[in-house]
Amino acid sequence: MNPKRWLREHSLKLLAIRDTPEAIAGGVAIGIFIGFTPLIGLKTALTILFAWLTRSNILAAVIASAAHDILFPVMPVIFRWEYDVGYWLLSSPHHLPPSIGKTHWDIHQLRSWSNLLTIGKPLMVGATICSAPFAFFSYVITKRLVARHHLKKRLQGEEHGKPGAL
């Protein structure tokens, strides 16, 4: 499917949700924020949980998280970028991690808890720092678009004799 068409269909689904612009925008921001994390098997569950806890729209959060999956082919690059940012922030004095080519990979070492902490901690810190601006801007943009869409629908409803229709 054409990515542009796919994105348009998902945005139309967001506009069809009957909720406040703030709740829909909050759901989108949560979906985008969690979409940047490396928690691949937990993204949908975490998206639903945080949308519910913040009283944001759960459907909007799931749609945004699914729309974020369009970046799946470039996620290894994004994860490396997030890891670099997290590693730099957590190291003292600040320095970038060694290049991937100099790292010796062992399959048994990858599954160890110590490796999870040495790689996972910088990756999660970097994911949090890097995804926050995207979540903030998606909130602002979505809130404006949904509010404009609701106003347009309300005005169309009033033209057809349905006061306050949404």
Image (cartoon, rainbow, N blue to C red):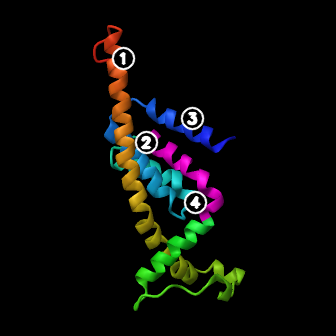
Residue at the spot of label 1? 156
Element on which disc 2 rests: helix
Give the magenta-colored segment's residue range: 59-75
In the image, what residue type sits under mark 4? Answer: Ile
In the image, what residue type sits under mark 3? Answer: Glu
Q: In the rendered structure, which disc, 4 or 1, sits on the residue that comes first in sequence?
A: 4
- Give the mark toward the camera: 2 or 3: 3
- Neighbor class of circle 1 (other Cα within 10 Å; few <14, some 14-19, many 20+) is some
Q: In the rendered structure, which disc, 4 or 2, sits on the residue that comes first in sequence?
A: 4
Element on which disc 3 rests: helix
- Neighbor class of circle 2 (other Cα within 10 Å; few <14, some 14-19, many 20+) is many
In this rendering, the answer to whether 24 lies above or below 158 is below
- Neighbor class of circle 3 (other Cα within 10 Å; few <14, some 14-19, many 20+) is few
- Give the mark toward the camera: 3 or 1: 1
Along the line of sight, which residue is nearer the eye, 46 or 151?
151
Residue at the spot of label 3? 9
Element on which disc 4 rests: helix
Label 4 to label 3: alpha-carbon separation:
24 Å
Residue 154 rendering spot, x and y as whole percentages:
33, 21
